[in-house]
Image (spheres, rainbow, N blue to C red):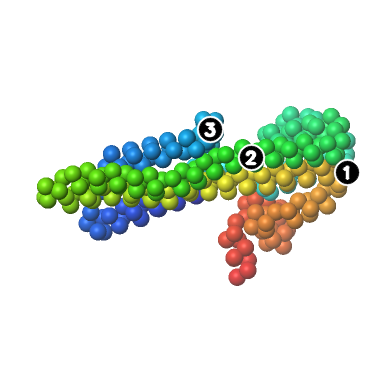
Amino acid sequence: MDPATIIGLLLAFGAMFTMLFMEGANVSSILLPAPMIIVFLGTIAVGIASGTISDTIIAFKSLPSAFRGKIAPVGELITRLVELADLARKEGLLALESEARETKDPFLGRALQSMADGMDGDELRDQLEDEISTRERTDAIAHKYFSTLGGYAPTVGIIGTVVSLTHVLENLSKPDELGHMIAAAFVATLWGLVSANFIWLPIGARLRRLSELEIDSMTLAMEGVLAIQGGSQSILLEEKLRAMVPSYALGTKNDKKNGKKSNFGAASVLDDFKEAA
């Protein structure tokens, strides 16, 4: 699990509420039901209106993944493909049929099964590319939906403020209440901006990033399977796949220098900085 979204949102809202405390304001002054209803419910409503019901269902079904953020280590996939290449060269492509049933990656499993069934290389590439393209389009529905909500939210907040200010103008005869009423009116604008920049846009960007990582993993698996079908040696296959992955996603070079087994996928960007230092 990658907790980036949870950490980021907690820090963002924490910063906002810390500012309220430092300014001596009361948190209850912005937790007003009416402005929050018009902003959140209104934003989701126009989001539904801007697409189809299935778009909304797909988007909210993908919402948990934005917080779980489970990202399969690329190094494990490379190691797995290298092992499969060794097996194919020793026992033939038919030996991969049992591996196809045991693998936990559905995409890799289908690719191995198609290869074991004797599908031609060009046909297999077309099939896998079509599946990757379909996955990419499906993922785009979710992250575009939340990005769209992020675009609507500030305007919906302004609408809420205008509605509240209309009510304020109707009560100019009550000067003692004007300050409170005007402040309450601008809460809708606040929540429009907060929901857009603290919730909808980050979720949309997060889902887009997760989709990019998943598509990269599927592309890596496709190239590995096609190389295995072509009879590529495991050493050459490993080098080819490693060249397709950014260095920070692979094992550290220090592991090789120390004669340790490379732990692909466990390295981070911080490791690269340490090594450079």
Quarter of the figure with the N terminus: top right
The first of marks 2 and 3 along the sequence is: 3
Label 2 SS: helix
What residue sits right under mark 1 in the picture?
A: 231
Q: Is residue 33 left or right of residue 108?
A: left
Disc 1 vs disc 2: Cβ atoms closer than 8 Å?
no
Q: Which residue is situated farthest in the bottom direction here?
A: 277
Q: Earlier in the sequence, mark 1 or mark 2?
A: 2
How many angstroms separate mark 2 from mark 3 (CA)? 15 Å
Q: Residue at image x 88%, y 41%?
A: 89
Which image quarter: residue 20? bottom left
The residue indicated by pointer 2 is 137
Q: Which of marks 3 and 1 is nearer the N terminus?
A: 3
Which residue carries the number 3 mark?
A: 52
Q: Which amino acid lies under the numbered mark 3 shown in the image of this protein?
A: Thr
Which residue is more in the foreground, 4 or 270? Answer: 4
Closer-to-camera residue (188/4): 188
List x then y, in percent, for residue 186.
28, 50
Residue 133 placed where, x, y %?
A: 69, 40
* Amino acid type shown at disc 1: Gly
Percent coordinates x, y for residue 107 in the rendering = 71, 36
Q: Residue at x 15, y 48 (%)?
A: 172
